[in-house]
């Protein structure tokens, strides 16, 4: 989500005539798009800002902008802490960057963090990839998970209309994009705030309806979506994914804890049994689907047994990938105020233990690709080895392979069959075949 916001803001700066500086310490305007999901992300921003503040003392024309979730969380307090900042802007204001910078030009310090209806994006994002594009479909989140700062910093749910989304996808296709990822903090909430009921009394604009609606855009070969919420994940959605050929066989469904008591404390609104049912449904309809998830360890009060229950779910499900995090108390969230916080040492130990298991399981899961032929969309040159290209399988496995096949070079943006001959925990390598 932050990457997509950054690309939109970079597009606005480009349309205003800004050119990307080669180095951060050479720029006349520096914009940090910040994250506050964990404390260490927050601390990094202050350290980056420190360097720019030093520069600003000798370069008064230097403009410093702090955007994103930390900006929203801290608001004016950020200006008190770092008075050299010119503009503090929350994520809902990303599309207003030009008008906010115009105010800054008049010599004002500006804070834009009020609740704001997100404007339909009129500027072309400056996207990092020419092949795969992010498409926001819903902003904000109305859930109240007790550990999570997102609703406080990204505001209420605001869905874009199906037509606006489809138009953006058509534009991407015209510009040569092959893959799109539909984005929402809780993408299953898509359309809850849009009007419309079907004749059968069902809501008209669900994520499933949206998938059917955008599926036929010519030129787009692959469609992904994230992030799913087990509370709202429907069987109808799984059936649509099985039926629509462009929808990739990868589901990212955070489960956060394998223990029902902790899930309740987190206010997630599902049990681990319901989560298992979703995974079983996916696997019965789409047997080769990859499943990934997010997990938090060391939530307040988590006992050793409750932690073991999480490890147990990892083994039972056999995830292709899991993003793990040690619980980090966030401002303005209920769990941060609870007295039963665990020590940093326990959290780090549990994180280490779970990471080892995640890696082991991911490698076991990857064995299923050995000697198989996988369809890979070529995304770029491997930044660590320019003799290789890289791309992803439909199941989202990063794959590396040589740049040519028989007597021709392979092009970025091409879809190519790769015979997988080398397996690691988080990536594959192989040989292109005709
Ligand atoms: S659904 Fe996701 S974004 Fe929303 S509050 Fe829960 S964890 Fe945060």
Image (cartoon, rainbow, N blue to C red):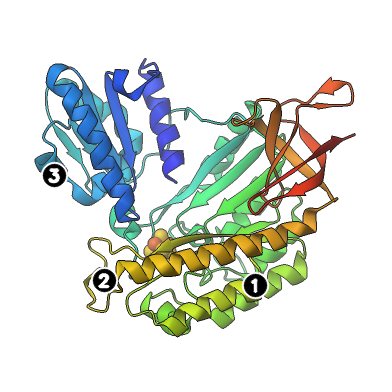
For disc 1, the neighbor class at 10 Å (few under 14, some 14 to 19, many from 20) is few
Give the quarter of the image for residue 288: bottom right
Q: Residue at x 68, y 51 (%)?
A: 424
Numbered tag placed on residue 76 in the rendering: 3
Of callouts 1 and 3, which one flags the residue occurring earlier in the amino acid sequence? 3
Q: Is residue 111 left or right of residue 385?
A: left
Drawn side of residue 120 relative to residue 56, left or right:
right
Residue 280 position (above or below residue 205): below
Please give the residue where the numbered disc 2 appears in the rendered image.
334
User: 220 or 259, which is in the foreground?
Assistant: 259
Q: CA distance from mark 1 to mark 3?
A: 45 Å
Q: Name the residue located 69 percent from the left edge and 44 percent from the top edge.
A: 222
Q: In what quadrant does ligand 1 lie?
A: bottom left
**Observer able to see residue 89:** no
Judge depth for marks 2 and 1 and give the one in front: 1
Secondary structure of the residue carrying tag 3 is: helix
Task: Tell me if residue 131 comes above or below residue 60 in the rendering.
Answer: below
CB of mark 2 near ligand 1 (< 8 Å): no
Percent coordinates x, y for residue 320 in the rendering:
65, 60
Q: Position of residue 351 (x, y in %)?
A: 45, 65
Q: Indicate which disc, 2 or 1, sits on the residue closer to the N terminus.
A: 1
Horizontal placement of 62 versus 206: left or right?
A: left
* Label 2: which secondary element: helix
Tell whether circle 1 marks a residue whose Cβ is less than 8 angstroms from ligand 1. no
Up/down of 112 relative to 369, above or below: above
Disc 1 marks which residue? 317
- The label shown at residue 48 is none
Label 1: element kind: helix
- From the viewer's perspective, tell me whether residue 33 is left or right of residue 321: left
Q: Is residue 82 visible?
A: yes
Callout 3: few (<14), some (14-19), or many (20+) C-alpha neighbours within 10 Å?
some
């Amino acid at each position: 989500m932050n990457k997509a916001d950054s690309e939109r803001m970079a597009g606005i700066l480009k349309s205003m005539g800004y050119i990307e500086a080669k180095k951060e310490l050479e720029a006349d305007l520096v914009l940090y798009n910040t994250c506050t999901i964990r404390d260490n992300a927050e601390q990094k921003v202050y350290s980056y800002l420190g360097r720019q503040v030093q520069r600003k003392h000798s370069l008064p024309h230097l403009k410093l902008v702090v955007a994103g979730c930390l900006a929203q969380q801290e608001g004016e307090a950020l200006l008190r802490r770092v008075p050299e900042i010119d503009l503090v802007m929350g994520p809902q204001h990303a599309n207003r960057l030009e008008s906010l910078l115009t105010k800054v030009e008049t010599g004002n310090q500006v804070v834009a963090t009020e609740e704001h209806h997100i404007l339909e994006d009129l500027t072309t994002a400056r996207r990092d990839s020419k092949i795969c594009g992010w498409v926001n479909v819903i902003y904000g989140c109305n859930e109240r998970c007790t550990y999570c700062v997102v609703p406080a910093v990204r505001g209420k749910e605001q869905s874009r209309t199906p037509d606006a989304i489809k138009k953006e996808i058509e534009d991407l296709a015209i510009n040569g994009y092959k893959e799109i990822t539909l984005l929402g903090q809780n993408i299953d909430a898509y359309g809850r705030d849009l009007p419309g009921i079907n004749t059968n009394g069902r809501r008209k604009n669900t994520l499933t309806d949206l998938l059917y609606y955008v599926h036929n855009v010519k030129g787009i070969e692959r469609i992904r979506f994230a992030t799913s919420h087990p509370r709202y994940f429907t069987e109808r959605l799984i059936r649509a994914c099985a039926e629509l050929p462009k929808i990739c066989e990868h589901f990212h469904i955070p489960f956060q804890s394998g223990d029902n008591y902790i899930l309740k404390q987190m206010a997630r609104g599902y049990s681990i049994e319901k989560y298992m049912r979703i995974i079983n449904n996916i696997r019965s309809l789409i047997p080769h689907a990859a499943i990934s998830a997010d997990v938090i360890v060391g939530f307040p009060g988590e006992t050793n047994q409750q932690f073991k229950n999480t490890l147990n779910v990892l083994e039972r499900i056999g995830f292709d990938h899991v993003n793990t995090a040690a619980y980090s108390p966030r401002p303005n969230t209920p769990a941060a105020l609870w007295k039963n916080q665990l020590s940093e040492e326990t959290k780090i130990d549990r994180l280490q233990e779970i990471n080892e298991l995640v890696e082991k399981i991911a490698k076991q899961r990857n064995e299923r690709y050995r000697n198989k032929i996988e369809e890979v969309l070529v995304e770029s040159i491997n930044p660590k080895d320019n003799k290789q290209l890289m791309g992803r399988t439909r199941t989202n496995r990063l794959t590396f392979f040589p740049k040519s096949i028989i007597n021709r070079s392979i092009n970025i943006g091409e879809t190519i069959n790769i015979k997988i001959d080398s397996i690691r925990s988080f990536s594959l390598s192989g040989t292109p075949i005709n």
